[in-house]
Image (cartoon, helix red, strand yellow):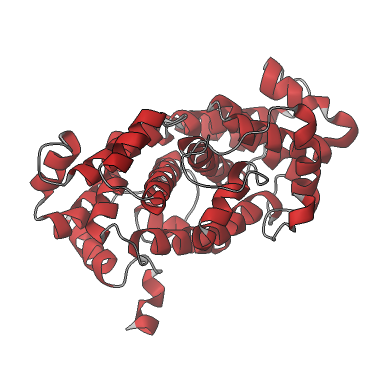
């Protein structure tokens, strides 16, 4: 049972963002821009960065949501887990592998070492890509703690994550209530 | 040296906001809602939670700047901030605030550490949903801000005095505004 009463019946983060709209709006705006805005990192690559953090933090709702969403771009849930376990295994190029390594360092916290950034740069990462990688990893450090810190409900049925991935890969991170307006 | 190019005259997170204004705008708005918006927690209490979490995460810029803002809010009682953050002395805060700081610390370590028992303890001391929610979200948000600042090695002034005007500005004007160059 969640640590606070929620009016929204949506599980995980969605209920919190709906019931607390003042904070929910900037969190949604930030996420929509970072994960779906114009970027030299693909949407799939950005979902992999999110997945590194959610899986590392063992946040069940967020891990399922973002691994299933990343799988839509990468091919399968198994392929996503393979990349997360071994970024340098050849499934993604070296530039992305280095950025995933930085994401894992951001998750655990503290200053990201210069040589890690240098390696990513040598593999072709730009300033904006470095910035966005760090901020996406930092943002999911918030999400995982918000979702688990308030003990939000998990969906009753795992097919929920497929429906969620449908939404996140099409309309993106806008509130589900706003979807009608954008269709 | 920061990992991305920032103006040498814009320390800390504001340098990062200027580098990427699109994300900067949303981050400033979030900080403002959390620390200056409606809440049963005073602005001083919320800045204290922010400082406490930032110190736990070892983020010097966020600790120094939010401690300065918290001291400004606490005014004559500003030593409460240093007692809680640096001396682990909770005698200057209410019992409820002390439990909320414990919740913030659990969130900092990882969300799954917030137990039903700890939340029940806060409720027995008068906490309503909004105390619990705001504490958890402020702690979670500072886990983001701290990682953003240190992950990119944002410019971090060394001297205590550098943070005093910053703290006063944060405490009085809040976060959702543009800082004119001359006052940075």
Task: Report the side of A126 relative to B36 (left or right).
Answer: left
Residue A57 visible:
no
Q: Which image quadrant for residue B158?
A: top right
Question: Residue B84: image x %, image y %?
Answer: 70, 23
Of residue B155 and residue B56, the one placed in the foreground of this image is: B155
Question: Residue B33: image x %, image y %?
Answer: 63, 56
Task: Report the side of B181 relative to A134 (left or right).
Answer: right
Task: Report the side of B63 relative to B80 (left or right).
Answer: left
**Going 90% across and 32% down the picture, which residue do you hit?**
B76
Of residue A176 and residue B157, the one placed in the foreground of this image is: B157
Relative height, residue B59 to residue B38 (above, below): above
**Going 12% across and 49% down the picture, which residue do you hit?**
A77
Task: Report the side of A95 relative to B136 (left or right).
Answer: left
Q: Which image quadrant for residue B165?
A: top right
Relative height, residue A174 to residue B21 (above, below): below
Residue A83 visible:
yes
Question: Residue B49: image x %, image y %?
Answer: 64, 35
**Going 26% across and 39% down the picture, which residue do you hit?**
A98
Q: Residue furthest right?
A: B76
Relative height, residue A145 to residue A37 (above, below): above
**Going 46% across and 59% down the picture, which residue do you hit?**
A30
Q: Which image quadrant for residue A91?
A: top left
Circle count: 0
Of residue B105 and residue B118, the one placed in the foreground of this image is: B105
Of residue A39 and residue B85, the one placed in the foreground of this image is: A39
Q: Residue furthest front?
A: A122
């Amino acid at each position: 049972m969640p640590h606070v009463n929620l009016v929204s019946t949506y599980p995980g983060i969605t209920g919190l963002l709906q019931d607390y709209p003042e904070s929910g709006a900037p969190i949604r705006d930030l996420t929509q821009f970072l994960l779906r805005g114009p970027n030299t990192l693909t949407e799939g690559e950005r979902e992999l960065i999110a997945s590194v953090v959610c899986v590392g933090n063992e946040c069940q709702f967020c891990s399922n949501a973002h691994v299933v969403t990343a799988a839509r771009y990468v091919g399968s849930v198994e392929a996503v887990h393979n990349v997360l376990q071994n970024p340098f295994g050849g499934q993604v190029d070296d530039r992305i592998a280095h950025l995933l390594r930085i994401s894992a360092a951001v998750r655990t916290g503290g200053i990201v070492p210069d040589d890690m950034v240098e390696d990513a740069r040598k593999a072709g990462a730009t300033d904006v890509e470095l910035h966005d990688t760090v901020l996406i990893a930092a943002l999911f450090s918030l999400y995982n703690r918000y979702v688990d810190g308030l003990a939000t409900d998990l969906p009753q049925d795992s097919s929920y994550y497929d429906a969620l991935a449908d939404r996140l890969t099409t309309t993106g991170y806008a509130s589900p209530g706003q979807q009608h307006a954008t269709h | 040296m920061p990992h991305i190019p920032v103006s040498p005259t814009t320390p800390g997170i504001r340098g990062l906001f200027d580098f990427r204004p699109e994300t900067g705008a949303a981050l400033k708005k979030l900080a403002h809602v959390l620390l200056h918006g409606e809440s049963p927690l005073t602005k001083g209490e919320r800045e204290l939670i922010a400082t406490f979490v930032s110190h736990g995460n070892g983020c010097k810029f966020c600790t120094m700047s939010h401690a300065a803002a918290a001291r400004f809010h606490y005014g004559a009682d500003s030593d409460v901030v240093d007692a809680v953050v640096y001396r682990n002395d909770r005698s200057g805060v209410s019992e409820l605030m002390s439990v909320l700081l414990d919740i913030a610390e659990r969130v900092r370590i990882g969300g799954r550490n917030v137990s039903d028992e700890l939340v029940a303890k806060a409720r027995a001391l008068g906490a309503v949903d909004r105390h619990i929610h705001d504490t958890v979200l402020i702690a979670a948000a500072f886990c983001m801000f701290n990682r953003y600042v240190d992950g990119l090695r944002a410019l971090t002034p060394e001297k205590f005095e550098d943070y005093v005007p910053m703290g006063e500005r944060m405490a009085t004007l809040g976060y959702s505004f543009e800082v004119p160059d001359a006052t940075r």
